[in-house]
Image (cartoon, rainbow, N blue to C red):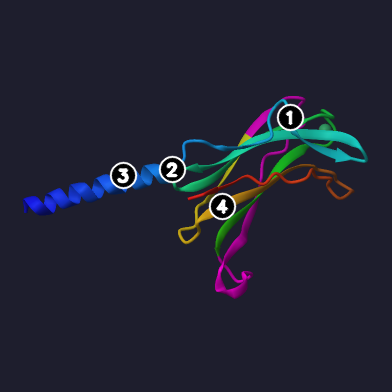
Amino acid sequence: MKRVITMIAASMAILGLTLGAAAPAMAVAWKSKTDPLFGYEDGDKFGKAYGNYYNDGNVSAMSTSYQYDIQAGGNNVRMETDFYFYEVGAGCTGGGACWVFDVSKQTPESNDAAWIKASRARNLHGKATGTRGGINICEIQAWHPDPCSAHAWPSFSY
Ligand SMILES: [Ca+2]
């Protein structure tokens, strides 16, 4: 009995170390307040953004962003995150893993000349080994296709 308990304790110690290593404390930052991602329409900046993407407790991928309406008022801006997972999927070749699109999530719209924070999460997939977010800022226009910035592509393995 004592040997069994010792083995369980040893296993738990190894598991603890493993979980600790698999839970990076650092978020993956993309751009910054002083060097943000800009969105343009016809050469004019409509908005800017930065943020981070991280493993939230080995439960979800969290996309946290800060959006800023450069042309305050008028049309609103919002962020969109396309969540991808590195896993075996129908679109992968040769039965291997590839980046598989899961879902898009948007932040609430804002039109303040101020940094507005918002987060969007997606549960981690048990069979995936990594995730990435395709993140951009768009201006929401009623009678015209929405102009959007290029994508930032932060990712992490787990
Ligand atoms: Ca605006």
Q: Residues within 10 Å of mark 4 (few under 14, many from 20)?
A: many
Dot 2 falls on a residue whose secondary structure is: loop
Q: Position of residue 74 (x, y in %)?
A: 85, 33
The residue wearing badge 3 is 16
Q: Position of residue 31 (x, y in %)?
A: 69, 34
Q: Nearer the viewer, residue 15 or 111?
A: 15
Which residue is pictured at 12% across the width and 54% down the height?
4
Which residue is pictured at 85% across the width and 39% down the height?
40
Per the model, the C-alpha gap separating discs 3 and 1 is 38 Å
Per the model, the C-alpha gap separating discs 4 and 3 is 23 Å
Q: Is residue 97 visible?
A: yes
Q: Is residue 65 visible?
A: no
The residue wearing badge 2 is 23
> Which residue type carries mark 3?
Gly
Whether residue 97 appears in magenta in the rendering, the answer is: yes
In the rendered view, tell whether residue 94 sits above or below residue 149: below
Q: Which comes before the other along the chain, label 3 or label 1?
A: 3
> Which residue type carries mark 2?
Ala
The residue wearing badge 1 is 35
Q: Which comes before the other along the chain, label 4 or label 1?
A: 1
The residue wearing badge 4 is 131
Dot 1 falls on a residue whose secondary structure is: loop
Residue range of the region highlighted in magenta in the rendering: 88-117
